[in-house]
Every structure is written in structure tokens, then in C-alpha cells.
Image (spheres, grey):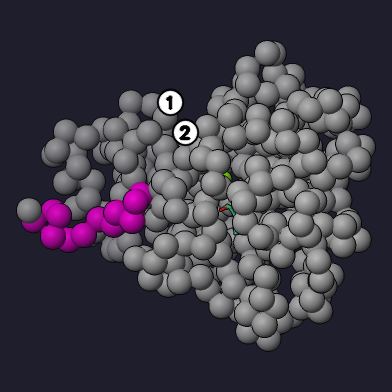
Amino acid sequence: MDTKLFQLTEIKEAAGLLKAGELISFPTETVYGLGANAMDEAAVKKVYAAKGRPSDNPLIVHVASVEEVEKYVGEISKQAKDLMAKFWPGPLTLIFNVKTGVFSETVTGGLASVALRMPDNAATLALIKYAGVPLVGPSANTSGKPSPTMAAHVYHDLHGKIAGILDGGATGLGLESTVLDMTNPEEPTILRPGAITKEELELVVEKVYLDQHLVSKDERPKAPGMKYTHYAPNEPVVIVDGTEEQWRKAIMYYKNLGEQVGLLANENRVNQYKKEVTEVFSLGNKDNTTQAAKALYAGLRFFEKTAVTLILAEAYDSKGIGGAYMNRLEKAAGNHYFLEKESKE
Ligand code: TXA
Ligand code: MG
């Protein structure tokens, strides 16, 4: 199958393919999604096949309006209404108790709930409206790889497997939406951190909880997707969280082991060490977490095209979107931080 790159003037054509049961990748404010008609089970099955995604991992259903939600969920709590009013369209996915019989088990992974989100991207909202149906939309990467933040990333992973990509340029935020479980409205619980933080949510609902796996690394995550290896490039990633001295030691240590070291770090660090390592990718200003979040996945993907065999990656402060940045980076690194003792072993 040829994968067509659709421009923003060709949204109707792309919507036609969705209606016909084909897969179209769409841009959002977070990452690119892999769209299929959520009401067409055969089309949804193709999504799992194209991504190589485990079938117990449910999909987010993307809607074009708040009103639509009533069609898919039983009772909408006041808390959920307030959250949608404040944050939709935007990077917040809400988990609701689903109305029985609306979505197939292929969409919900057989759970009694469904994940809904209204993306903040005019082209994609138009695409959903023209298609006339809600769209499932997992991130449009091969399962386990970093999510795509550009049409070229989607093409790299999925060309030949999907009908088209709606090219909306680079995505704004660069990390997937915050996933908030609202199945018990008295206990809104963050299952996946994103650009919208616990503190921001607590300006709308009284108290927001964190799923245990975000607090203790031993807990099994409640969002099925969070238990898989994720966001990982082909090369191992090691996080460096520390002083200049630590960075020097880490670089030396891995070079001595014969690794071709890649540096995924802030601008200053990249400039300082670029002559000593194989490749570098700048995450931008050292104090700008927003910029780092936006660049993270492109950076992880960059090293796949190089001779680098090991990536040393920069830890950022976990305030604001930094929490989501560190969550994704820790997953990409399998929680491997460079420790002083390593350099002494
Ligand atoms: O920003 C985003 O959310 C992107 C864009 C494309 O919208 N989409 C995305 O989808 O990240 P995906 O499939 O890669 O991640 C969906 C996450 C997974 O961790 C999945 O397990 C969880 O949401 N999820 C989906 N339905 C759920 C449910 N009913 N209960 C708990 N977790 C659920
Ligand atoms: Mg994903």
C-alpha cells in the first residue's frame, strides 16, 4: 500500500478514506495519532496490526465536541463536566464508565471504561467532523518506539501499512496527553502524566490522586499501556542527573567500555562535550523544560540514524511538563540512572 501524505487542503479526501475503513495518521497538539473509525471493528483491528500493539492495551477515542460524550458514556459527573469545560480541546484524556454496546472490545480492551479526548488541532477536529465518526488514535509509532512528533516519524514507522498521513507539521507539546481516570468522580486519578499537571487539575476538582505506579516503581500501572517498554530507541539510554563532574565521569566510563556515546542534553552541555562524544542532540536551553519535552522524542529517534551505541540523557526538573518528560525518559531508559558507583566498578 502506498502511504499518501495529505496536505491541510485535503482533509475531506483523508476523511473519505477513514469512512471507508482505512487508517489515516493525524496531527494533534501532543503527538501524531493513528486514526481509524472507532465504530468499525475491522478498521480498529488494523490499527493494532500496523503498530504491532498488544491487544489488551485499549485505545483513546478522539471526539470533536464535548456534546458527543453523552452518546458514549453513562452518567457524566459534575467533575468531568468541569474538566472538559476547562481543558478541552486539549491534552487531557478522561476515562469514563462506558455505555455498554457502544464500542467493541477491540477499542476498550474489554474494560468497562473508555478513554476519550478532544485534541486541540483544528485540522484534526475538521477531519473527525468530516469523517462523521469518533476516531481511535493511539500514538502513530511502532509499538514500543518513541511517539512521532512529525509526519516524517510516522512515515518512517508505518509507511506501506497505512493509507495516509495528514501533515500538520511538528506537534506543539511533544509528549502524550495526561490520562485521568474519572470512573470514580470522587477520586480522579492520574494514570499517565502529561502537559496538564496535578496542580492544574486541582484548580478544577478538589483532590487528584496519582496511580500507585507513578509513586512506587514496583506497582503495576492501571493504564494497561503503561506497563510495556516504551518510548525506547534501539540504543540503551542512561539518565545523568547531576553535576558537571558526574557528566564527565559518565562520558569517560562509557567511552572506556568501547561505547559510541550520544549526548541528549541541554545546549550548554552539548556545546561543552561535542568534541568528546560521537553525536549530540540539543534539548535546548537548560531551564526550558517545555522545549526539552518537545524535542525528546525527535532526539531519541535521531540517534537511530547514527553510529551511537549508547545515549546519555539529561534529567530535567520535574515541575510542570517536566514530570511527564521524566516519566517518558525513565521509561525509555528502563529507569537506568548513571550512578557514581558505576564509574568505580
Ligand atoms: O496524546 C495522546 O494521548 C495521544 C494522541 C495521539 O492523542 N494518544 C496516545 O494514545 O498516547 P496511546 O494509545 O499511545 O496511549 C493511550 C493510553 C495507554 O496507556 C492506554 O493503556 C490508556 O491510555 N488507556 C486507554 N483506555 C484506557 C482505559 N479504559 N482505562 C485505563 N487506561 C486506558
Ligand atoms: Mg503510545
Q: Is residue 10 visible?
A: no
Instruction: Name the foreground residue: 284 vs 222.
Output: 222
Considering every residue shown, the one lying at the far left of the view is 345
Q: Secondary structure at mark 2?
A: helix
| Left or right: 180, with 281 as reference point | right
The residue singled out by tag 1 in the image is 305
The residue singled out by tag 2 in the image is 302
Q: Amino acid at mark 2?
A: Phe
Q: In the rendered structure, are the residues bearing label 2 and label 1 in contact, judged by CB atoms less than 8 Å apart?
A: yes
Let me know if residue 338 is in the magenta part.
yes
Q: Quadrant of residue 256?
A: top left
Seen at 33% across and 26% down, the residue is: 307
Q: Quadrant of residue 25?
A: top right
Instruction: Name the foreground residue: 144 vs 235.
Output: 144
| Left or right: 97, with 288 as reference point | right
Considering every residue shown, the one lying at the far top of the view is 1
Instruction: Name the foreground residue: 283 vs 303.
Output: 303
Q: Amino acid at mark 1?
A: Lys
| Left or right: 337, with 127 as reference point | left
